[in-house]
C-alpha cells in the first residue's frame, strides 16, 4: 500500500505553489500527493496511510490561534490513523519579515508555539519563502527523510566518489533537481600535492586513479555492482557516526564543524546547481533539444552530470586535472545497475 | 602587433560612442553587457549626467560548438573604449571630434520613436559620415521586449524608413550611407547578438578567424561554431553558415551556465594547484628582445 503525503494549511498560505513542487517530487517517491485545505468528515480516508504531513503556516498570519486550532485537529487525526507519519511544518513567506536580524527570532518563537501545540509528536520546522533557497532546502530535507535508505545511498555515493577520485558526488531528483543524497566530505586534509600537468602525449586512461588516496584504485577499477563495503581503515572520507549523509550535516547542525571539510565549497551550491540546470533545460526545450548530460572542464574543476537511474541525476565533481571525463562517465555507467537496485529497495511502495 | 608585455595604456583602442535620448537604455546596455548587471537591476540606474568612458578588453577566448567548450590558452586582445553619454549630448557638447570614433551606436527606445530622436540621429549620422566615411553607424531599436511581435516588426521597419527619408532630405547621396539597424532588449540574448555584430566590424583579423571556424566545422562535423569571449558572452567570429538566433541563444545560455557553475564547486584547497596546471607557462620568447 502506498503511503501518501498530506499538504495542508490555511487558504492563501501558499500551498498551490508548494504543491507544484511536491507533485514533481512525488514522481520520485512513487507515492500519492494529496492536498486538502480543511478537515473533512472522512477523516479516516484522509489520514490513513499517511507517510508525511506537511503543514504550511503563514509567518504573519492574521489568525494564528485559529491556524493552530486547525493544525491541532489535523495532528490529532493523524496520530489516530497514521501514528508513524513524519510531520514537517513550514513557516512560509518568511520574506515578509523585513528586518534581517528578526527572522531567526520570529522563527524561534513560532517553533516554540508549534512544539507546544504538537505535544509529544516530533516535528521539524522550516522557515521558507519562494523567493530564496530556503524552500529548496526544506524540500530537500523532506525528500531525504522520505527515502528510508538515504544513509545507504550516501555510503554508495561515497564509494563512487572514491572510485572517481571525486571531491563530491551529488544525487539529484530528476525533475525538481532536489538533492536526495551526497557523498560524505573527505576529511584527511592531505596538503594539495602540486599535480603534474597532464602530458599531452600520454594515452588517455579510462581508469580513474586518485593519487592522494591511500587505497589502491586498481583494486576497484570501476564501480562494480556486487556489495560494496567501504574500507573502514583506509577510507579517506569522514566516518559518519550519527550523520549518515554529508548533505544533512551541511547546515542546521552545530555539531558538525565545517572546518573539517578541507574544500569548503560554496554552501549554496546545490540550490544554485538546481536553478542553473533547470534554466538550461528550459533553454534547450526552446530549440526542441533535449537535455541529457553535461560535461564541464572548467578552470577550477571537472564535472559530469548524467542520468544515474530513471528518476535521478548524479553530479561528480573532481578537482584532479588528470582525471578524464570519459572515466567519470564510465564509472557512472557501471554504477547504474547498483543504484537502480538500491532505489528499487527504497522507493517502491511498502506493502 | 602588440607584444605580450604591452602596457594597456599604450594600446590604440577602438572607440565606440553610445548616444540616444534620455532613458533609452544606454547605461543599461553597457552595464548589462560588460558588468554582468542583472536586467532587473538596471531599473535602479541613475540618469547619466556627464560623458563617461569605460575600457574593456577581450581576454580568454573559447570556441563553442555543439556544446563542447574549450578554454583556449590564448589571449587575443580587442581593446575597446566605450563612451556613455547623457541624453542631452550633442555634437557640440561632446567636445571631441566625431572622427575619433570607429563606431557610433544610436539607441532608440522602441516605445518613444518620435521626430525628435530621428532628427537627432540623422544629424549625428550625417556629421560623422562627413568626418569619416568609414565610420560604422549602428542603430539599436531597444526595449523590443515591450512590444508584441507584430508591433515590434512594424515599428522597426517604420524607423528604418523614416531615417532613410530624413537623410535623403539633407542630401540625396546620404540615402546611401550604410546604417545597421538591430532590434535589442536586455531581457533576452538579442543584445549580445547585436553587439557581437558591432564588434565584428572592428576586428581586422575577422576573415582569418572565420576561416578557422569553417575549418573547425568541416573537420569536426559540427553544424555551427562560435568563438566566444567568455566574460562578455559576445561572439568574436563564427563559421560561414548563417547564424540562427535560437542556436546562438542556446550557446550563449550554455556559456552563461558554465560561468555560473565555476565558483560553485571551487575548492579552497584543491583549486589553486589546478590553476597552476591550466595556465600555460609563457613561452620564453614572449619577452621583448630589444
Ligand atoms: N523593458 C526594457 N527596459 C529597459 C531595457 N533596457 C533598459 N531599460 C530600462 O530603461 C530605463 C533607463 O535606462 P538607462 O540605462 O538609465 O538609460 P540611459 O539611456 O542611460 O538614460 P540617461 O542616462 O538618462 O540618458 C531603466 O529603467 C532600464 O531598466 C530593455 O531592453 N527593456
Ligand atoms: N510574500 C510571499 N508570498 C507568497 C509566498 N508563497 C506564496 N505566496 C503568495 O501567497 C498567495 C497564496 O498562494 P496559494 O498557493 O494560492 O495559496 P493556497 O490557497 O494555500 O493554495 C499567492 O498570491 C502567492 O503569490 C512566499 O514565500 N512569500
Ligand atoms: Mg545613462
Image (cartoon, coloured by chain):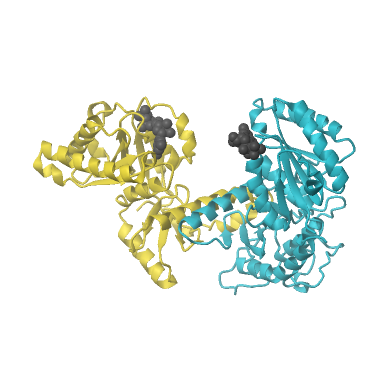
Residue A54, image x, y percentages: 75, 43
Return the residue found at the far left.
B172
Left or right placement of residue A279 versus residue B200 in this view: right
Q: Which hue belongs to chain A?
A: cyan
**Image quadrant assignment for residue A203:** bottom right
Q: Quadrant of residue A104?
A: top right
Q: Residue furthest bottom?
A: A203
Residue B117: x and y in percent read 25, 32
Which chain shows up in yellow?
A: B
Eyeballing the image, is A289 above or below A220?
above
**One can see residue A266 in this view:** yes
Using the image as rendered, state which of residue A63 and residue B66 is in the foreground: A63
> Which residue appears at 77% of the width and 26% of the height?
A65
Q: Is residue B103 visible?
A: no
Where in the image, quadrant-wise, is ligand 2 located? top right
Q: Residue furthest front?
A: A41
- Reply above or below: B215 against A119: below
Which residue is pictured at 73% across the width and 56% down the height? A29
- Give the x, y percent position of residue B197: 33, 50
Viewer-side residue, A31 vs B203: A31
Amino acid at each position: 500500500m502506498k503511503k501518501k503525503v498530506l499538504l495542508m494549511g490555511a487558504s492563501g498560505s501558499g500551498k498551490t505553489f508548494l504543491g507544484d513542487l511536491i507533485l514533481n517530487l512525488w514522481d520520485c517517491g512513487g507515492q500519492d500527493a494529496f492536498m486538502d485545505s480543511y478537515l473533512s468528515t472522512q477523516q479516516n480516508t484522509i489520514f490513513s496511510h499517511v507517510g508525511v504531513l506537511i503543514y504550511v503556516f503563514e509567518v504573519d498570519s492574521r489568525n494564528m490561534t485559529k491556524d493552530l486550532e486547525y493544525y491541532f485537529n489535523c495532528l490529532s487525526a493523524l496520530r489516530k490513523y497514521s501514528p508513524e507519519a513524519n510531520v514537517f511544518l513550514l513557516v512560509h513567506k518568511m520574506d515578509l519579515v523585513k528586518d534581517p536580524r528578526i527572522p531567526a527570532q520570529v522563527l524561534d518563537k513560532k517553533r516554540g508555539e508549534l512544539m507546544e501545540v504538537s505535544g509529544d509528536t516530533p516535528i521539524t520546522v522550516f522557515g521558507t519563502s519562494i523567493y530564496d533557497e530556503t524552500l529548496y532546502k526544506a524540500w530537500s530535507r523532506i525528500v531525504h527523510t522520505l527515502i528510508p535508505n538515504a544513509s545507504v545511498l550516501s555510503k554508495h555515493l561515497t564509494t563512487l566518489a572514491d572510485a572517481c577520485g571525486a571531491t563530491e558526488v551529488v544525487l539529484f531528483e530528476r525533475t525538481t533537481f532536489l538533492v536526495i543524497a551526497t557523498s560524505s566530505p573527505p576529511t584527511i586534509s592531505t596538503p594539495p600535492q602540486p599535480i603534474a600537468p597532464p602530458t599531452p602525449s600520454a594515452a588517455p586512461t579510462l581508469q580513474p586513479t586518485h593519487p592522494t588516496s591511500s587505497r589502491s584504485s586498481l583494486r576497484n577499477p570501476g564501480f562494480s555492482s556486487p556489495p560494496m563495503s567501504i574500507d573502514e581503515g583506509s577510507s579517506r572520507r569522514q566516518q559518519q557516526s550519527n550523520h549518515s549523509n554529508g548533505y544533512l550535516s551541511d547546515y542546521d547542525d552545530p555539531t558538525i564543524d565545517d572546518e573539517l571539510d578541507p574544500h569548503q565549497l560554496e554552501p549554496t551550491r546545490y540550490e544554485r546547481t538546481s536553478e542553473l540546470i533547470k534554466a538550461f533545460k528550459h533553454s534547450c526545450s526552446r530549440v526542441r533539444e533535449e537535455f541529457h548530460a553535461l560535461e564541464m572542464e572548467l578552470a577550477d574543476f571537472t564535472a559530469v552530470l548524467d542520468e544515474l537511474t530513471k528518476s535521478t541525476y548524479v553530479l561528480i565533481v573532481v578537482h584532479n586535472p588528470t582525471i578524464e571525463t570519459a572515466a567519470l562517465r564510465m564509472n557512472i555507467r557501471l554504477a547504474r545497475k547498483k543504484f537502480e537496485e538500491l532505489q528499487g529497495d527504497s522507493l517502491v511502495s511498502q506493502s | 602587433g602588440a607584444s605580450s608585455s604591452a602596457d594597456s595604456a599604450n594600446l590604440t583602442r577602438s572607440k565606440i560612442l553610445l548616444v540616444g535620448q534620455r532613458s533609452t537604455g544606454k547605461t543599461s546596455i553597457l552595464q548589462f553587457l560588460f558588468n554582468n548587471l542583472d536586467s532587473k537591476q538596471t531599473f535602479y540606474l541613475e540618469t547619466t549626467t556627464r560623458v563617461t568612458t569605460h575600457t574593456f578588453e577581450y581576454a580568454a577566448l573559447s570556441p563553442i560548438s555543439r556544446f563542447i567548450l574549450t578554454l583556449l590558452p590564448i589571449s587575443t586582445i580587442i581593446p575597446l573604449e566605450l563612451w556613455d553619454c547623457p541624453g542631452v549630448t550633442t555634437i557640440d557638447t561632446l567636445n571631441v571630434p566625431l572622427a575619433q570614433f570607429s563606431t557610433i551606436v544610436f539607441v532608440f527606445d522602441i516605445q518613444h520613436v518620435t521626430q525628435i530622436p530621428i532628427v537627432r540621429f540623422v544629424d549625428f549620422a550625417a556629421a560623422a559620415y562627413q568626418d569619416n566615411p568609414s565610420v560604422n553607424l549602428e542603430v539599436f531599436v531597444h526595449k523590443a521586449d515591450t512590444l508584441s511581435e507584430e508591433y515590434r516588426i512594424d515599428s522597426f521597419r517604420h524607423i528604418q524608413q523614416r531615417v532613410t527619408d530624413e537623410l535623403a532630405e539633407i542630401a540625396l547621396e546620404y540615402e546611401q550611407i550604410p546604417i545597421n539597424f538591430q532590434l535589442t532588449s536586455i531581457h533576452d540574448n538579442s543584445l549580445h547578438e547585436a553587439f557581437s555584430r558591432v564588434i565584428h566590424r572592428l576586428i581586422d583579423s575577422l576573415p582569418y578567424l572565420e576561416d578557422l571556424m569553417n575549418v573547425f566545422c568541416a573537420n569536426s562535423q559540427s553544424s555551427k561554431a562560435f568563438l566566444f569571449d567568455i566574460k562578455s558572452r559576445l561572439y568574436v567570429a563564427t563559421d560561414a553558415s548563417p547564424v540562427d538566433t535560437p542556436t546562438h541563444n542556446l550557446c550563449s545560455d550554455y556559456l552563461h551556465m558554465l560561468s555560473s557553475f565555476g565558483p560553485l564547486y571551487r575548492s579552497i584547497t584543491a583549486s589553486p594547484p589546478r590553476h597552476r596546471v591550466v595556465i600555460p607557462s609563457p613561452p620564453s620568447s614572449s619577452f621583448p628582445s630589444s
